[in-house]
């Protein structure tokens, strides 16, 4: 479904997404991105580095948030995305990505979207903001 | 060690210290997008007329050096990746030859419960083989520092 700028209200919530952060999928990401570090793709290696298990790369979390926007508005053009990696998301966990429209700019027909990824304990591990243009 | 952040900025920010080249490969563009849950065929289907990298794709690229040669070793702890900001400017297509230039964009501190944190913003500016800017990525690296002022 294509959205237009006028379709979107201030405070609109994007449909949440439960991203696939299984070890197999994270390994697919690390292969495609060249991030072949054990802490992302091997639970045992991550534990040796003092982590509770393998962790999702920060830029994969960022990509999950970009995908969240595109699922909601396939015709959206992301003109900026800024993410803060507060704490790791564990591989093989069950996080949820969310977004809410926090500002509208009628001149540029652009939106500001606040973004989060929470773990099962409802702890916000990744926060971000995106600027998005819609026709 | 006491660290003078303003002096660090004066001495180190704003000049290119590394240049690296990359090629955008179709399989990597698809794998990156699909693993993130991307469903838009612009990003997942090489046969799509407007096939391109997802907007944050350049954040995967790392230069040959993270900091300039002789940049002072700061703080006593280890650094970590605190976040990334991506400003897409133009599409990256499969086969594009991407040149990335790195500089220190900013240095600043924040104080929180765990003490003073020193942030170094590493900026990479990307352009394609035609010299057109395609993206800017700011990578915030953090070091815990007990002497920043």
Image (cartoon, rainbow, N blue to C red):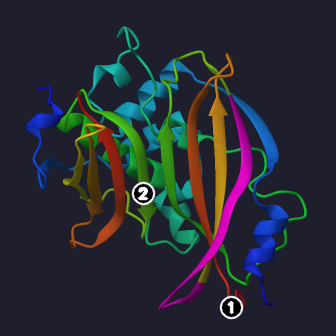
Pick the front one: B76 or A91: B76
Q: Residue B148 at x, y = what percent?
A: 70, 86
* Residue at left offset 26%, top offset 52%: A113
Q: Is residue B3 above or below residue B10?
A: below
Mark number displayed over residue B146? 1
Quadrant occupied by the C terminus of chain A: top left
Q: Which residues are magenta?
A: B99-116
**Residue occupying the far front of the picture:** A107
Q: Which residue is mark 2?
A: A83
**In this rendering, position of residue A67 left or right of residue A43:** left
- Judged by its main secondary structure, the magenta piece is strand
Residue B114 visible in the displayed image: yes
Query: Could you tell me how far apart the alpha carbons at marks 2 and 1 are, in whole angstroms?
Result: 26 Å
**In this rendering, position of residue A123 left or right of residue B86:** left
Q: Quadrant of residue A88?
A: bottom left
Q: Is residue B89 above or below residue A117?
A: above
Q: Quadrant of residue B46?
A: top left
Pick the front one: A78 or A85: A78
Q: Is residue A117 magenta?
A: no
Quick one: SS at disc 2?
strand
* Residue at left offset 47%, top offset 49%: A59
Tally the marks.
2
């Amino acid at each position: 479904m294509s959205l237009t700028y006028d379709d979107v209200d201030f405070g609109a919530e994007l449909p949440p997404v439960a991203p696939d952060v299984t070890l197999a999928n994270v390994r697919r990401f690390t292969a495609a991105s060249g991030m072949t570090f054990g802490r992302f793709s091997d639970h045992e290696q991550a534990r040796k580095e003092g982590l509770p298990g393998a962790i999702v790369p920060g830029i994969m979390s960022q990509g999950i948030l970009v995908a969240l926007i595109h699922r909601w508005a396939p015709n959206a053009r992301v003109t900026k995305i800024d993410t803060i990696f507060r704490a790791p998301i564990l591989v093989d966990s069950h996080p949820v990505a969310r977004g809410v429209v926090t500002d509208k700019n009628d001149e540029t027909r652009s939106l500001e979207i606040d973004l989060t990824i929470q773990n099962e304990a409802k702890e916000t591990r990744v926060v971000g903001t995106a600027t998005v243009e819609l026709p | 060690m006491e660290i003078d952040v303003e002096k660090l900025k004066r001495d180190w920010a704003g000049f290119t210290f590394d240049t690296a080249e990359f090629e955008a490969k179709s399989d990597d563009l698809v794998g990156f997008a699909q693993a993130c849950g991307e469903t838009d065929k612009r990003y997942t289907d090489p046969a799509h007329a407007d096939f391109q990298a997802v907007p944050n794709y350049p954040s995967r690229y790392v230069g040959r050096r993270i900091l300039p040669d002789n940049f002072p070793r700061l703080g006593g702890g280890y650094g970590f990746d605190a976040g990334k900001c991506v400003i897409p400017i133009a599409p990256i297509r499969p086969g594009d030859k991407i040149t990335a230039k790195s500089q220190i964009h900013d240095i600043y501190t924040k104080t929180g419960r765990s003490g003073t944190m020193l942030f170094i913003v590493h900026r990479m500016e990307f352009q394609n083989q035609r010299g057109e800017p395609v993206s800017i990525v700011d990578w915030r690296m953090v070091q815990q520092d007990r002497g920043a002022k």
